[in-house]
Amino acid sequence: MEQFTFIDLFCGIGGFHQAMVDLGGECVYASDIDAYCCKTYELNYGFKPDGDITKVKEEDIPKHDVLCGGFPCQAFSKAGKRLGFADETKGTLFFDILRILRYHKPKYALLENVRNLASHNNGNTWRVIHDSLVDIGYNVIDEPVIFSPHYIGIPQHRERVFIMCVRKDIGELPPFYFNIDRIPKCSIDDILQKDSEIEDLKRYQLKPEQIEWIDNWNEFIQGIKCDKLPGFPIWSDCLCPIEESPLYKDWDNQPGWAKNFVRKNSELWENNKEFINSWLEKAKKNNLFFGSKAKFEWQAGDCQKPNIWDHIMQIRPSGLRVKSGTYFPALVAITQTSIVGKRKRYLTPRECARLQSFPDTFIYDVKNSQAYKQFGNSINVSLVKLFAKYMFGDQEIQSKYSYDAQFGKGEIEPSLFPDYE
């Protein structure tokens, strides 16, 4: 597939486009309903995507060799094949992919979706998608392929389902294997900009009040006495006797998991009463210490000298979450941009672009809120390349992800993602 044409459905800012062009493809059609994404797409690739695909007739879409699409996940009917797959998928955006594939019969299709697709609707969603594609003439691997950028050394944990489709007259599609025990090491340093390179650096740096707030939680994690750092959520208003917890007023109606967390928080307080009472008095003086910011989740493993600033942080509805500084949690489309502890600042849009394997020449939205959202919704370019090559029959890639290579004596090769030095 040195030269080929492709269409880019639900295109977003062009993760599929970037990968396919890098592999020698020419985009002949794109569509998305997000006006901001379409603007970014046009800015980078020179043409404006079409609008709502549900209103586009399949005969109006140009012929193409490859259909690409990261479609939204929706529930399908459980009625069964007796009604036909077309009936089962009506009302979903996958139906639009199906009708375009049925009409144009391109050689290949590469689709992507959230990890939950594998188990969604008790497996019925995957069954309908798989069997629908097979029914219209494509070879598809029986089980959903779940893969993440950090599996090939890109420092972002972002598991997604990839669906490779090869038209039956083109060839077979061998099973895809990956040994989860052989993930290469990741380093967040591979994608970080130097602070001196960042325009308006102050915009991304934590404010003094935020640093003080995080310092307070750092003092907490370093000051408590326990055999093992708490893996359960810390709820500051439950660091007290159970009877004084705000949840105790409606105790009988609380779910079991909530009661369990309250008990664990109360037990931690009981064993560190003097320290925690003093710490709470100080922490509450910070104006940020309320709501979710009065909660804390340590997910960085056990260590002798814990230090929040050595790790990655996210401010989430469940509290300040601290994760090991090896790879970032998945970029998301909402305002939960990761904080780089050792830099005391948020990830920049350029660093988010790198986490999704976009080149440094990629132009992102001038509004940071839109840029973060768009990268959070995008697909990783390097993974598209990997699965496109596998689907196209690249012998080296297919051999690398064969059973023998993954579970035999074969070695995982170095990272596939670009060098940003």
Image (cartoon, helix red, strand yellow):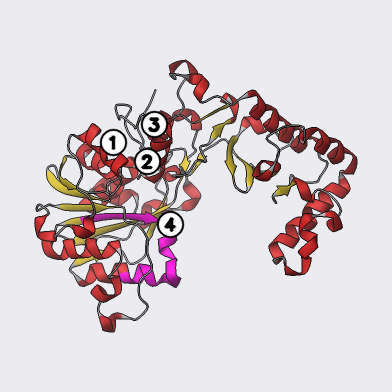
The segment highlighted magenta reads 109-128
Q: In this view, does 193 lie to the left or right of 380?
A: right
Residue at 35% from the left image edge and 52% from the top image edge: 401
Mark 3 vs mark 2: in front: 3
Label 1 element class: helix
* Residue type, mark 4 in image: Arg
Cβ atoms under marks 2 and 1 closer than 8 Å: yes
Q: Mark 4 points at which residue?
A: 115
The quarter in which the C terminus is drawn is top left
Please tell me which of labels 2 and 4 falls first in the chain.
Answer: 4
Mark 3 vs mark 4: in front: 3
Mark 1 vs mark 4: in front: 1
Residue at 16% from the left image edge and 39% from the top image edge: 24
Please rate how many residues cluster around mark 2, counting C-alpha atoms within 10 Å: few if below 14, some from 14 to 19, many from 20: many
Q: Mark 2 points at which residue?
A: 374
Residue at 90% from the left image edge and 40% from the top image edge: 274
Q: For marks 2 and 4, give the CA distance.
A: 19 Å
For residue 79, above or below residue 405:
below
Q: Name the residue under label 1.
A: 40
Q: Mark 3 points at which residue?
A: 367
Asked if residue 3 lies in the magenta stretch, the reply is no
Label 2 element class: helix
* Residue type, mark 2 in image: Gln
Q: For marks 2 and 1, give the CA distance.
A: 9 Å
